[in-house]
Amino acid sequence: MTAEFTPTVVPLRHLYTVADAMRLLSIGRTALYEQIRSGRLRTVTQGKSRRIPAAALNDYVQLLIKEAEECHDQAA
């Protein structure tokens, strides 16, 4: 039995700084960059600045939810 989850869209901006994404995801800088390096969190560059699209944040959260459900289903 899986809990119903209604995804919410990250509001307000289209692009977030690394610091913004850290706060939104409640993870540290090292963990955030590891997710970027592994390809689990997409980014774009704007000049010399790295930005995380709101859609990429939503996709990453959905990936975490899917992985948690799969892990839970395998344990049951």
Image (cartoon, rainbow, N blue to C red):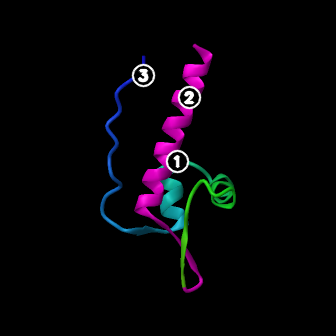
Q: Amino acid type of disc 3?
A: Thr
The numbered disc on residue 2 is 3
- Give above or below for 70 relative to 55: above
Residue at point 46%, 44% (across, down) = 62
Earlier sequence position, callout 3 versus callout 1? 3
Q: Quadrant of the N terminus?
A: top left
Quadrant showing the C terminus: top right
Q: Which residue occupies 37% across, 68% down?
A: 14
Q: Which residue is mark 1?
A: 26
Above or below residue 35? Residue 76 is above
Q: Tell me if residue 62 is in the magenta stretch.
A: yes
Residue that badge 2 annotates: 70
Q: Is residue 68 magenta?
A: yes
Using a 10 Å C-alpha cutoff, classify the residue at mark 2 as few (fewer than 14 neighbours), some (14 to 19) or many (20 or more). Answer: few
**Residue 60 x/y as whole percent:** 51, 50
Most frequent secondary structure within the magenta stretch: helix
Magenta residues span 47-76
Mark 3 and mark 2 lie on one chain; the one further toward the N terminus is 3
User: Which one is closest to the eye, mark 1 or mark 2?
Assistant: 2
**34 sits to left or right of 55:** right
Taking depth in this image into account, of 72 and 13 the one nearest to the observer is 72
Residue 73, quarter of picture: top right
User: Residue 71: x, y in percent?
Assistant: 59, 26
Q: Residue at x 56, y 22 (%)?
A: 72
Q: Secondary structure at mark 3?
A: loop
Q: CA distance from mark 1 to mark 2?
A: 22 Å
Residue sitting nearer the eye, 35 or 67 = 67
Q: Amino acid at mark 2?
A: Glu
For badge 1, the amino acid type reads Ser
Secondary element under disc 2, as helix, strand or loop, is helix
Q: Using the numbered discs, state the Cα–Cα distance from disc 3 to disc 2 in whole angstroms.
A: 10 Å
